[in-house]
Image (cartoon, helix red, strand yellow):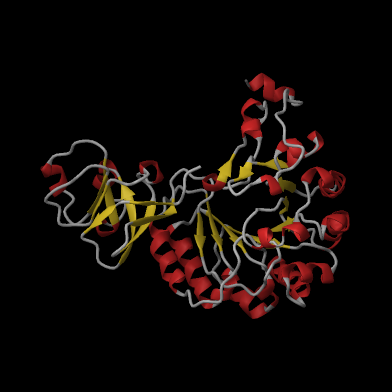
Amino acid sequence: MLPLYTQANINHLRGARVLKIVDIEEARQARFPAEKSLIWLDQPVTDLALEQFAGAVIATSRPVQDISGITIENPKTEDVIAPGDVIRVQEGSSRISVFYRRGSNSNTLMATERCNSFCVMCSQPPREVDDHWFVQQMLDTIPLIDQSEKMLGLSGGEPTLLGDDLAVVLHQARSHLPETVLHILSNGRRFSDPVFCRMIAAVNHPHIQWGIPLYSDDPGQHDYIVQSHGAWHETVEGLYNLARANASIEIRVVVQKSNVDRLSELARFIFHNLSFVDHIAFMALEPMGFARTNHNDVWIDPIDCQEQLFEAVSYLADRGMNPSLYNFPLCTVSPALWDFSRQSISDWKNVYLPECEECAEKSNCCGFFRTIDPGWTSRSIHPIEKSPHPEFEEAE
């Protein structure tokens, strides 16, 4: 687990900058603008070599002298940054924030902290602040991301609250990352406005999937979970409008105490009314934010909802739909559901417990969120001694 920030000695910096870390070879190829590049020096280099890249700024883990551009020296945690990453630095601060990490399984851009829902288990509680600067930050970051990146997340808060600026960001992504899939987390409510939906669809980005939560087939139950009256109807209408625009849609169901007993009904509702969706993710809670505050109201041990999970997942799978389990360690679910389990936890917040060290399925398991503690630990946690999947044993 690598954090997304570190500290370093930063010199000759004015204002705030979003920068791409490149090695000498990438600098020679000039794939990224010199004024937005940090040359990574992990080996001796001649003054002549540096002169070739005059105008580029320099990042190094060793002292440098006679460099007039920005220098970043002696990162406190050196592994946090590496060539290929996109970082942000600010005048007067020693902090380096990582916006994009080459090779990560979970690069996500923050769109806003604002939200029009107030979910009882939200891992990142919204704030009603003026954070329009996130838009420019995304516009600065996107051109510096590797064009070979397969997927890029966009999250919040609620990204659709950006309004027209969301379309500007999507145009930037289409221009600079035409082959990269954008996975955008949204509550879907603003798409109930057909004018807004058409405006976003008009960007004509070829690779967007919208991850939209639907927590129950019961409008009242969903509205309680998101703490907003009428939200269910807005979300469902938004889903239909997105479908009319031929959007790719993922339904996200956070499994918690208040909705677990209606998972089967929700699965039936999705099949009969939302059969156009591409994926349905049943997700275990992340122990952060409002989830911690409302622990007693939301937490259910995964081992206690196996029957409901199996009924919902198997119902959808048997009818040709595409369900998955996210954030459920394999030892907390029935082996009958393992084929649906995904390694879904972002690498920068993914940990394994001591019990996992002897587990035969560790390499196939999602593990845990780094914020796990005894209050969020299933009583079923244990090392699995032998894989029930013969193909895994043969691969070893």
Q: Nearer the viewer, residue 308 or 312?
A: 308
Determine the image quadrant of residue 331: top right
Specify whether residue 276 is in view. Answer: no
Determine the image quadrant of residue 297: bottom right
In the image: residue 144, left or right of residue 340:
left
- The residue positioned 85% from the left and 61% from the top of the image is 269
Viewport quadrant of the C terminus = top right
In the image: residue 53, left or right of residue 199:
left
- The residue positioned 75% from the left and 48% from the top of the image is 322
Is 283 situated above or below 386? below
Q: Nearer the viewer, residue 15 or 148?
A: 15
Q: Nearer the viewer, residue 49 or 361?
A: 361
Q: Nearer the viewer, residue 80 or 373?
A: 373
The x and y percentages for residue 257 are 80, 57
In the image: residue 184, left or right of residue 230:
left
The x and y percentages for residue 229 are 76, 77
Is 37 situated above or below 49? below
Disc tally is 0
In the image: residue 300, left or right of residue 28:
right
